Image (cartoon, helix red, strand yellow):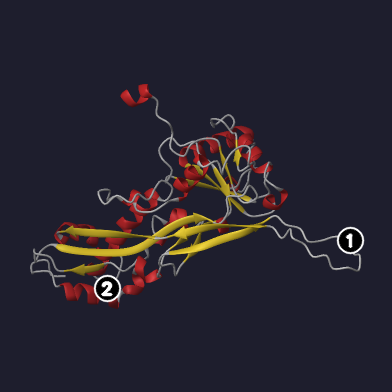
């Protein structure tokens, strides 16, 4: 790209098409910190009905007579709906020349990774950060005046809060466990209790336990206070909830709201996200604007989140809200 001349949009899109193999999709960048612990469902353009059979029994003593069974379990359906989202950029590319030289020209072959491609990848990377930040907090609102990404689809946290409000997740239903406030003095035992009260079938699965980065620090501090570190000890043990035989991987995320005490225990297979085509997640295209020196580009994709099941055999959350409740005094301060 010759920044002394008007931007050649055709040349930009041609370069991107030629080098599309180097582009990284937005679900593999910052958003991938969350999404790699979930299950992708491509090919969804509107919605898809999910479901899992819960309960049921068909066995009995042999009598020589076929009696059949009407207790085949209950099929509980849940719908994964995807919604459109856009990422748009408009800026003068001259501002990014120094960053490009620092990140690319010094270490990569510029002929294999031209500035045009770097600029498009920069836009996709920003879109990935935006998506990451709302993957637990977004809530779809059918209001044309609300244009932020956080109101464009239903994220996992919003889904859980809605199910709590509807009475479908509760202490009584056993898909919620009362940990109370967590800190460095009690987080280890409380999270272990949360896992141990799960059904035996769940405890044999590979599970994921989602907590905030701050609670992750508390867990580290608790673990250090409880453990005598011997020479040669595998530091990777810290990724797993102690005393679960490495069945529960602790996922520390900064996608939770600041100060969140929320904990989510489930499996990778139970947390799904949908989109249409993988190519949509890298399909940022440049287009002409009224300013020949202004670089404008946009991408459109669909995204949606859902749990296959919220049955206590598949999922449990603690009794703390995803978003901390701010008191009146705290709000005023």
Looking at the image, residue 292 lies above or below residue 332? below
Eyeballing the image, is 175 above or below 297? above
Neighbour class for label 1 at 10 Å: few (<14), some, many (≥20)? few
**Cα distance in 3D space between marks 2 and 1:** 67 Å
> Can residue 178 be seen by looking at this rendering?
yes
Q: Indicate which label's residue lies in the foreground, 2 or 1.
A: 1
Residue 54 location (% of width, % of height): 66, 55
Quadrant of the image containing the N terminus: bottom left
Residue 260 x, y percent position in the rendering: 46, 37
Which quadrant, please, contains the C terminus? top left
Residue depicted at x 34% and y 70%? 22
Q: Residue at x 18, y 59 (%)?
A: 90
Residue 265 at x, y = what percent? 58, 46
Helix, strand or loop at label 1? It is loop
- Marker disc for residue 16: 2
Q: Which of 280 and 294 is in front in this view?
A: 280
> Where is 157 relative to 27, above or below?
above
Determine which quarter of the picture holds residue 64: bottom right
Along the line of sight, the residue nearer the viewer: 183 or 77: 77
Closest to the observer: 26 or 240?
A: 26
Query: Is 331 above or below relative to 85?
Result: above
| Residue 229: x %, y % from top left | 62, 39
Residue at the farthest top position: 329
Question: Residue at point 79% right, 65% down?
Answer: 68
Q: Mark 1 points at which residue?
A: 61
Mark 2 is surrounded, within 10 Å at the Cα level, by few (under 14), some (14 to 19) or many (20 or more) other residues, namely many
């Amino acid at each position: 790209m010759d920044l002394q001349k008007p931007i050649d949009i055709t040349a930009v899109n041609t370069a991107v098409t030629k080098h599309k193999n180097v582009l990284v999709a937005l679900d593999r960048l910052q958003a991938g910190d969350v999404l790699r612990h979930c299950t992708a469902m491509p090919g969804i353009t509107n919605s898809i009905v999910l479901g899992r059979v819960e309960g049921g029994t068909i066995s009995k003593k042999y009598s020589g007579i076929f009696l059949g069974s009407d207790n085949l379990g209950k099929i509980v359906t849940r719908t994964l709906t995807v919604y459109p989202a856009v990422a748009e950029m408009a800026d003068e590319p001259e501002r990014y020349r120094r960053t490009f030289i620092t990140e690319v020209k010094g270490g990569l072959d510029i002929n294999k990774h031209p500035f045009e491609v770097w600029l498009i990848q920069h836009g996709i990377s920003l879109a990935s950060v935006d998506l990451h930040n709302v993957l637990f907090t977004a809530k779809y609102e059918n209001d044309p005046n609300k244009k932020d990404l956080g109101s464009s689809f239903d994220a996992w946290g919003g889904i859980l809060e809605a199910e709590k409000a509807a009475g479908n997740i509760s202490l009584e239903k056993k898909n919620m466990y009362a940990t109370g406030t967590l800190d460095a003095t009690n987080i280890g035992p409380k999270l272990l209790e949360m896992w141990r009260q799960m059904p035996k079938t769940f405890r044999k699965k590979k599970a994921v336990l989602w907590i905030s980065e701050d609670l992750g620090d508390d867990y580290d501090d608790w673990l250090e206070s409880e453990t005598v570190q011997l020479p040669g000890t595998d530091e990777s043990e810290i990724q797993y909830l102690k005393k679960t035989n490495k069945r529960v991987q602790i996922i520390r995320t900064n996608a939770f709201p600041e100060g969140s005490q929320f904990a989510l225990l489930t499996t990778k297979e139970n947390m799904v996200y949908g989109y249409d085509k993988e190519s949509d997640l890298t399909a940022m295209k440049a287009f002409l604007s009224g300013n020949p020196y202004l670089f404008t580009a946009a991408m459109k994709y669909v995204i949606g989140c859902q749990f296959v099941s919220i049955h206590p055999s598949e999922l449990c959350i603690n009794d703390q809200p995803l978003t901390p409740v701010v008191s009146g005094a705290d709000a005023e301060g």
